[in-house]
Image: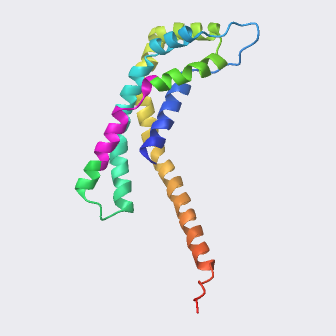
Amino acid sequence: MNMKSLAMILIIALLTSCAAFAQQSPSEAPASREDVLKLFDVMQNREQVRRTMESMVSQSQVLMREQIKQRNPKITDEELAELNQEAEEMWKNFPVDQMLEDAVPVYQKHLTKTDVDAMISFYSSPTGQKLLREMPAIMSEGMQAMYPDIQKHMDATIRRIDERARKQQQEKPAPKSQP
């Protein structure tokens, strides 16, 4: 799994796991941009994303290093270090604020002001705060637990694609020689 895919899975999981989306009924007031931003602040989304990314960087670098070495045994330690540095830069410069801003209309579409107020109340409670504190570890451990199955699935898919490509190459007629 490449770093960008892992990051997107992480962000989507974090944003969706923190909200139970409900359909708006026409009689309920929609959540305002300010309501959603307040929810994000109470949920500590920026800090949650930052902490989760830090945890995922270290785990993913180890896993990616192993995967890269398997696929390219001749890669040097210097090349691996360079790839690690690039990955760290990608994570460090990840546009968290812009992603949260992009999520505001999605929350507004699915949540009413009543929904957002109830979520703010929950995430302000001791239980909500505990969930927020534990979420990075939950996500990290969850990804760690899921990674072997994800890797098996990806490896099987790559093998099928490689096999299909080999068959297609074998089935191609040999190029005719020009007189």
Left or right: residue 176 compared with residue 74? right
Residue 172 point in image, percent of width and height: 62, 78
Residue 144 point in image, percent of width and height: 42, 41
Left or right: residue 173 compared with residue 26? left
Residue 105 point in image, percent of width and height: 60, 19
Q: Nearer the viewer, residue 118 or 166?
A: 166
Query: How many numbered marks does the figure carry?
Result: 0
The vertical placement of 147 against 15, above or below, is below
Residue 26 point in image, percent of width and height: 76, 11
Q: Quadrant of residue 21?
A: top right
Q: What stretch is highlighted in magenta?
A: 83-97
Task: Kindly identify the residue that appears in the image at 25 percent across and 49 percent down.
Answer: 81
Task: Kindly identify the residue that appears in the image at 66 percent across and 19 percent down.
Answer: 109
Residue furthest toward the left?
78
The vertical placement of 115 against 158, above or below, is above
On the question of residue 135 being in view, the answer is no
Q: In which quarter of the image is residue 166?
A: bottom right
Identify the main secondary structure in magenta: helix
Task: Kindly identify the residue that appears in the image at 50 percent across and 58 percent down.
Answer: 155
- Which quarter of the rendered picture does the C terminus lie within? bottom right
Task: Kindly identify the residue that appears in the image at 44 percent across and 10 percent down.
Answer: 126
On the question of residue 38 being in view, the answer is yes
Q: Residue 94 in magenta?
A: yes
Left or right: residue 20 compared with residue 45? right
